[in-house]
Image (spheres, rainbow, N blue to C red):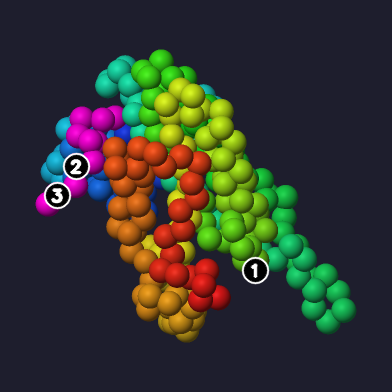
């Protein structure tokens, strides 16, 4: 028996949709018959035809810098003008700029995480989630409800070497998710976060084989995640099947937390 998600015809925005988890998520919503707006700082126009071929009721693409309020406002206005509403926002866009806080060798500091590395990650991963949600939720309130889904990470729960900036943003996303659940629930807007574990995106696949083997070794289910694993979680959280799931932080990690 098939599960009815209730997503057909609904308007969905996916940020960071040009590749990886974002692309898989946009395509997964398309398969449910949703109208999908693919946002990315890179050109995502080639994705439009794929989304329609996958089953999207309609699809669009926009070049959006989620860290820029004007860029976000213009993109939201386009979606509202085209479809009249936003039912689901998936705040997936994110970047990494890894470095140790202080690298100490032979009795001296040889490197630190720079202001630029800190600011860049905070701007996209944290401020970007804030800006997109702030711009979209008034339209959801006016329409009588909606769903906001935020990309956190298992490192936001447990930390990770060399990722002070990234971990800070992903922990911050969890805090915003739980705050917005309190603030927006009365407007029938559900807000949840997803914490992926090690997922086989193109960037991760480019890592040395020894590193990838170590990741799998710490994942009890015995494999890395696929972008589609995370996309499936987003679709379920957005669906009518998850209608009473609100303020949740869902780890999709193959048991990584229990395996470390």
Q: For this view, does 43 lie left or right of residue 64? A: left
- Do the CB atoms of the residues marked 2 and 3 lie less than 8 Å apart? yes
Instruction: Give x and y (percent) for residue 7.
Output: 24, 36
Segment tinted magenta in the rendering: 1-11
Instruction: Give the camera-side residue of 162 and 136.
Output: 136
Q: What residue sits right under mark 1 in the picture? A: 161
Q: Earlier in the sequence, mark 3 or mark 1?
A: 3
Q: Is residue 98 visible?
A: no
- Do the CB atoms of the residues marked 3 and 1 lie less than 8 Å apart? no
Residue in the picture at 45% in, 70% down? 255
Q: Main secondary structure of the magenta part?
A: loop
Q: Which structural element holds mark 2? A: loop
Is residue 10 on the magenta stretch? yes
* Mark 2–mark 1 distance (CA, rounded to whole Å): 41 Å
* Mark 2–mark 3 distance (CA, rounded to whole Å): 6 Å
In the displayed image of the protein, which residue is found farthest to the front? 244
Image height of 187 relative to 163, above or below: above
Q: Which mark is residue 2?
A: 3
Q: Is residue 96 visible?
A: yes
Q: Which structural element holds mark 1? A: loop
* Mark 3–mark 1 distance (CA, rounded to whole Å): 42 Å
Q: Residues within 10 Å of mark 1 (few under 14, many from 20)?
A: few
């Amino acid at each position: 028996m098939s599960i009815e998600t209730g997503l057909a015809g609904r308007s969905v925005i996916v940020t960071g949709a040009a590749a990886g988890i974002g692309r898989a998520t946009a395509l997964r919503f398309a398969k449910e018959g949703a109208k999908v707006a693919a946002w990315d700082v890179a050109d995502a126009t080639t994705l439009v035809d794929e989304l329609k071929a996958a089953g999207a009721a309609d699809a669009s693409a926009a070049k959006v810098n989620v860290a820029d309020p004007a860029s976000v406002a213009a993109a939201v206005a386009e979606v509202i003008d085209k479809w009249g509403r936003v039912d689901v926002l998936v705040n997936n866009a994110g970047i990494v700029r890894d470095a140790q806080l202080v690298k100490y060798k032979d009795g001296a500091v040889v490197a630190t995480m720079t202001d630029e590395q800190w600011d860049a990650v905070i701007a996209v991963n944290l401020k970007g989630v804030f800006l997109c949600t702030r711009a979209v939720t008034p339209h959801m309130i006016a329409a009588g409800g909606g769903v906001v889904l935020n990309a956190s990470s298992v490192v936001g729960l447990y930390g990770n070497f060399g990722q002070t900036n990234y971990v800070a943003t992903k922990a911050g996303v969890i805090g915003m998710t739980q705050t917005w659940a309190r603030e927006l629930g009365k407007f029938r807007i559900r807000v949840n976060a997803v914490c992926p574990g090690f997922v086989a995106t193109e960037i991760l696949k480019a890592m040395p084989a020894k590193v990838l083997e170590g990741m799998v070794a710490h994942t009890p289910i015995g494999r890395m995640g696929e972008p589609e694993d995370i996309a499936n979680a987003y679709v379920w959280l957005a669906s009518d099947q998850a209608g009473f799931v609100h303020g949740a932080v869902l780890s999709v990690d193959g048991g990584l937390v229990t395996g470390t």
